[in-house]
């Protein structure tokens, strides 16, 4: 089983790498090799990525790579959004929104974990379990999503909800939200 899971993870990463290259855009594709090898340019390229959300249908999720980390991007269904909003903050093992790149201390409400309003259906997370750093399952169709319909980390049994918050198991914190913004209604820039 573990071998299949590993293979599946690799396939996901291959898919994602392809997608990530695809979202860089035509301008970047024509950079000569010498520019790609320039450390400054290289570091800059890794600092942020743009992801086109248009192909991601409701109920689907993709994984992008940003600064060497898997980024989960889920187009949540209305039911998943409601499920996330219905949770009482006092029921959360970790009541803090883990927002990378900010010192703000905010409660882990769905509103604080997303961009709200028209964009509340989009959930963007660093896809790393906060227990020991495994990559939770729940991205691919047919994956188990755990008891709270979000993600499940089979390494030691951590269950995350539809806002990426830890609900059961040994993980001490909610999954983190990377810094990102919408640069158009269907495109985000991460980093
Ligand atoms: Fe996820 Fe242990 S690494 S539960």
Image: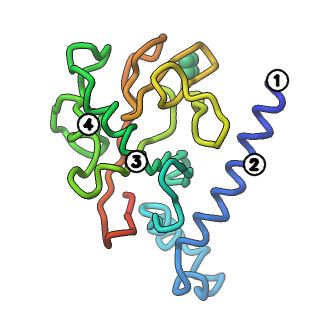
Q: Which is nearer the eye, 167 or 180?
A: 167
Q: Which residue is mark 3?
A: 124
Q: How many marks?
A: 4
Quadrant occupied by the N terminus: top right
Looking at marks 1 and 2 on the same chain, the residue that comes earlier in the sequence is marked by 1
Q: Residue at x 46, y 64 (%)?
A: 53
Distance between mark 3 and mark 2 Cα atoms:
21 Å
Distance between mark 1 and mark 2 Cα atoms:
15 Å
Q: Residue at x 50, y 45 (%)?
A: 72
Residue 30 location in percent, x, y?
60, 88
Residue 115 location in percent, x, y?
25, 52
Q: Which residue is mark 1?
A: 1
Distance between mark 1 and mark 3 Cα atoms:
28 Å
Q: Which mark is residue 110?
A: 4
Report if the CB atoms under discs 1 and 3 are less than 8 Å apart.
Answer: no
Q: Which residue is mark 2?
A: 11
Q: Secondary structure at mark 2?
A: helix
Q: Which is nearer the eye, 40 or 25?
A: 25
Distance between mark 4 and mark 3 Cα atoms:
12 Å
Distance between mark 4 and mark 2 Cα atoms:
30 Å
Q: Is mark 3 within 8 Å of ligand 1?
A: no
Q: Which mark is residue 71?
A: none
């Amino acid at each position: 089983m573990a071998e299949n899971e590993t293979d599946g993870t690799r396939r996901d990463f291959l898919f994602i790498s392809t997608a990530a290259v695809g979202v860089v855009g035509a301008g970047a594709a024509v950079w000569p090799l010498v520019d790609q090898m320039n450390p400054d340019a290289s570091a800059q390229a890794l600092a942020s990525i743009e992801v086109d959300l248009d192909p991601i249908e409701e109920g689907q999720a993709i994984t992008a790579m940003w600064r060497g980390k898997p980024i989960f991007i889920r187009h949540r269904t209305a039911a998943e959004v409601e499920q996330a909003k219905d949770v009482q903050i006092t029921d959360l093992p970790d009541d803090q929104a883990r927002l990378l790149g900010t010192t703000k201390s905010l409660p882990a409400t769905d509103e604080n974990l997303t961009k709200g309003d028209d964009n509340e259906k989009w959930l963007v997370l660093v896809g790393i379990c906060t227990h020991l750093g495994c990559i939770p399952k729940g991205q691919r169709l047919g994956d188990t999503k755990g008891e709270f319909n979000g993600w499940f980390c089979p390494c030691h049994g951590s269950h995350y909800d539809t806002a990426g918050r830890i609900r059961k198991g040994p993980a001490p914190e909610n999954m983190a939200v990377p810094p990102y913004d919408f640069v158009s209604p269907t495109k985000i820039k991460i980093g």
